[in-house]
Amino acid sequence: MPEAALFHGWQLATLAAIRDETPSVRTLAFSLPQWSGHVAGQHIDLRLTTDDGYQAERSYSIASPGGCIPLIEITVERIADGEVSPFLTEELSLGDTIELRGPVGGYFTWTADNPAPLMLIAGGSGIVPLMSMLRTRARSADRRPARLLYSSRNFDEIIYRGELEGLVATPDGFSVAHTLTRGAPANWNGETRRVDAEMLAKYAFPAREAPHNFICGPTSFVETVADRLVALGHQESAIKTERFGPTGETR
Amino acid sequence: MPVTRGFKGKRSNVDGTHDRIPPGQYLTKDFPVLTAGPTQRTQVHDWSLSLQRGGQVLALWSWEQFEALQQTERITDIHCVTKWTKFDTRWRGVTIDDLLKAAGLPAPPTPFVMAHCDGGYTTNLPVADLLGNQAMIATHYDNEPIPVTHGGPARLLVPHLYFWKSAKWVRRLEFIETNTPGFWESMGYHIHGDPWREQRYTGDA
């Protein structure tokens, strides 16, 4: 199990850079007094305090590559009626400070010395911890085969689109397949439906190659993909998942 | 505490509910699904629950036998370490007190328990947190069988601790002498997990 040094105490992070990824998604880069590195896939906690002492805490996956780097990046999708994400994506300004602690989490993690093929399957903002893995891989000398299957609602909502194109352009054994579930541009040559068994059979590494599969996205997306990978013969222990959002389950 | 410039907050924890939301938590009406891997789909005819110590089986119930044990209903708030809190969740199952009674155990054989689940998940608990009607093996949620994504056919319910302790798809309670970290507890999460003391991660008080 990869372990990064942990700073569990809260520290005051300073917003050092902002990058808009899509109309509703913003990357925030923080500088920290203390940070000895993280493992790709881990998250941090943020704590926000109002002037009368009310506090809200949230977890966000780290987007920047694993290892020790000067700035920690998170990528935040604005949820219209959310308590914290509208503030982070619309209000927080360069030089502002916010309480942060981490890194946290030791299961949904990947390091570049992992010899297995790396299969990443993302729905929407579920790309964030997987991007940390891809950025980690891109910085490593010895790169194993890696694939990303990425489901977005539409073209303009593909997070990190340009950077992913750049990674694919480097001939190092990485490929991306996009699917758009709510309409595609006229010249689109990717997929245009929800991830299904046929799509996984086409784009995922076959079970016989014993890949490590990381799935991150909305609950119903992750449920579907994980079940189908099991049906395709993948070991359950080689399927790691992170789910977010409502259950989407009817009772 | 350092004020976050410009942050107003939505304060889900006012309006008379303040004392029901532990620090750092927010209220949700939804029931999110958090699982480290694929959902387990155990059929009740393949399910059993056992109490064990060392290699010894102290008691074993099939689904039918388990459903015939004394059933208890409970309405309780639950708190996930990922920050959501849900009020008034309604469960039905068998309390750990009643399980020990049914097993003919006058007292718990050891001070700690490791819960073992389908899919390989484990979590550790002091027996003291399981007795006194604080915990049950739950089979029903909202008067229906627990959905598989929420741990059906049976999950541990220990609602006064963070919800990762309420292990989904539970199959075996192993009585152990020393408090040994389970799955999340060995990956940076707190050994005990009391939400009111905000024991989220290793190193928290």
Image: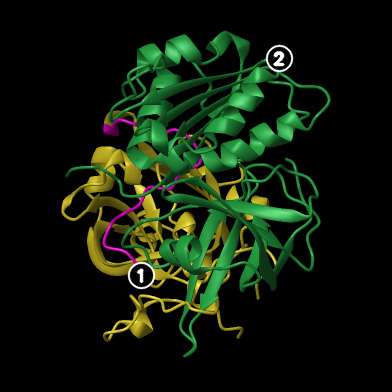
Q: Say if the magenta span includes residue B34.
A: yes
The type of residue carrying mark 2 is Pro
B35 vs A172, nearest the viewer: A172
Residue A218 is tagged as none
Residue at image point 39% right, 60% down = B96
Residue B133 is tagged as 1
Which element is circle 2 on? Answer: loop
Q: Is residue A225 above or below residue B183?
A: above
Q: Is residue A7 left or right of residue B148?
A: right
Q: Quadrant of residue B158?
A: bottom left
Which image quarter holds the N terminus of chain B?
bottom right
Residue at image point 18% right, 43% down = A250
Which hue is chain B drawn in? yellow
For the colour green, the matching chain is A
Q: Quadrant of residue B113?
A: bottom right
Residue at image point 76% right, 21% down = A143
Q: Position of residue A115 (x, y in %)?
A: 74, 21
Label 2, on which residue? A171
The type of residue carrying mark 1 is Asn
Q: Which residues are magenta?
A: B27-44
